[in-house]
Image (cartoon, rainbow, N blue to C red):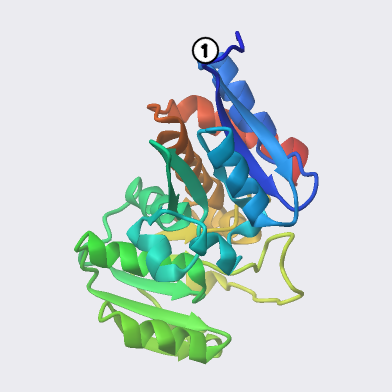
């Protein structure tokens, strides 16, 4: 790959040194002969990163550890509807000198599910009520997707109730203790349970519970086969592991920041290699 004055630079914004993703996007650029680089920029101040994008006319950035920083919203010139609603920016795209904020998680989750099943007229059961689900519900509303019902189960009931009060798509909100009695068409797991970032919370998905669904979608992308997906495979239940969601998130990053059409097969291969080497 030739690096020259036209090379597009996409940043990974981070508070400290971290190699995650560097061995996904750079090999992708190389193998697809794209004149681009994915570089780590480390500084605890999000404003430093944003000014670098502006001053050096960079293509954009994946915000990484700054997603939850409220200062980032204020630094954007424009916002896509999802970050505007959720208050969280995951991607910054330099669009003709104007920095626009996007949030990729909702799009990634919806597209991963769509590879297996339509959400229209389906009974959906969700474990978790964080930003991913907030964005997901907002996206369904924007795209006028109408599941038959959406039930949300969460350890902190107030978080789920807030979503239930905000979206008419949500037909029922219940405490996590009652999840074991739920059933439907699609089960979405959107908590840290089963991931290395789990805060010592434990939850056991029983076989009888999992058999109540025709599709199981997990947002946990590390490890590649988290406990929920291992159980679904053992029971022969169709499933969407979290790395599928990550694939479509990554594709959105490349589309919005670099303005390219994405080879999903190659990107998926590189994601799995990097996860096994640098993430697990």
- Which residue is denoted by mark 1 in the rendering? 33
* Picture coordinates of residue 122, whole percent (x, y): 26, 67
Q: Secondary structure at mark 1?
A: loop
On screen, residue 156 above or below 17 = below
Q: Residue at x 45, y 39 (%)?
A: 94
* Picture coordinates of residue 262, whole percent (x, y): 42, 28
* Picture coordinates of residue 79, whole percent (x, y): 38, 57
- Tell me if 222 is positioned left or right of 119 in this view: right
Q: How many marks?
A: 1
Q: Residue at x 38, y 36 (%)?
A: 96
- Tell me if 42 is positioned left or right of 88 in this view: right
Q: Is the N terminus in the top left, top right, bottom left or bottom right quadrant?
A: top right
Residue located farthest toward the front when viewing the structure as drawn: 55
On screen, residue 62 above or below 70 = above
Residue placed most toward the observer, 221 or 125: 221
Label 1 environment density (alpha carbons within 10 Å; few <14, some 14–19, many ≥20): few
- Tell me if 39 is positioned left or right of 113 in this view: right
On screen, residue 46 above or below 254 = below
Q: Is residue 8 visible?
A: yes
Residue placed most toward the observer, 14 or 204: 14
Q: Is residue 212 visible?
A: no
Q: Quadrant of residue 39?
A: top right
Residue located farthest toward the top when viewing the structure as drawn: 2
* Picture coordinates of residue 54, whole percent (x, y): 54, 41
Residue placed most toward the observer, 106 or 102: 102
Q: Residue at x 39, y 52 (%)?
A: 107
- Tell me if 257 is positioned left or right of 63 in this view: left
């Amino acid at each position: 790959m030739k690096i020259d004055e036209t090379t597009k630079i996409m940043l990974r914004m981070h508070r400290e040194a971290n190699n995650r993703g560097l061995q996904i996007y750079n090999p992708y650029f190389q193998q697809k002969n794209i004149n681009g680089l994915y570089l780590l920029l480390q500084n605890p101040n999000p404003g430093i990163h944003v000014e670098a994008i502006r001053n050096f006319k960079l293509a954009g950035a994946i915000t990484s550890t700054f997603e939850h920083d409220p200062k980032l919203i204020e630094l954007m010139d424009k916002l896509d509807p999802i970050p505007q609603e959720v208050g969280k920016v995951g991607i910054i795209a330099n669009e003709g000198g104007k920095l626009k904020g996007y949030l990729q998680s909702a799009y990634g989750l919806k597209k991963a599910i769509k590879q297996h099943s339509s959400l229209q007229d389906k009974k959906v059961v969700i474990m978790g009520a964080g930003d991913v689900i907030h964005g997901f519900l907002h996206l369904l509303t924007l795209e006028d997707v109408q599941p038959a019902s959406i039930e949300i189960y969460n350890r902190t009931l107030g978080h789920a109730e807030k979503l239930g009060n905000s979206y008419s798509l949500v037909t029922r909100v219940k405490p996590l203790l009652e999840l074991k009695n739920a059933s439907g068409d699609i089960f979405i797991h959107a908590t840290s349970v089963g991931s290395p970032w789990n805060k010592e919370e434990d939850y056991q998905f029983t076989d009888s519970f999992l058999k109540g669904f025709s599709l199981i979608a997990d947002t946990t992308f590390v490890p590649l086969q988290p406990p929920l997906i291992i159980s679904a495979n053992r029971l022969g239940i169709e499933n969407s592991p979290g790395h599928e969601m990550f694939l479509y998130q990554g594709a959105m990053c490349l589309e919005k920041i670099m303005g390219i059409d994405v080879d999903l097969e190659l990107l998926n291969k590189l994601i799995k290699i990097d996860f096994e080497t640098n993430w697990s």
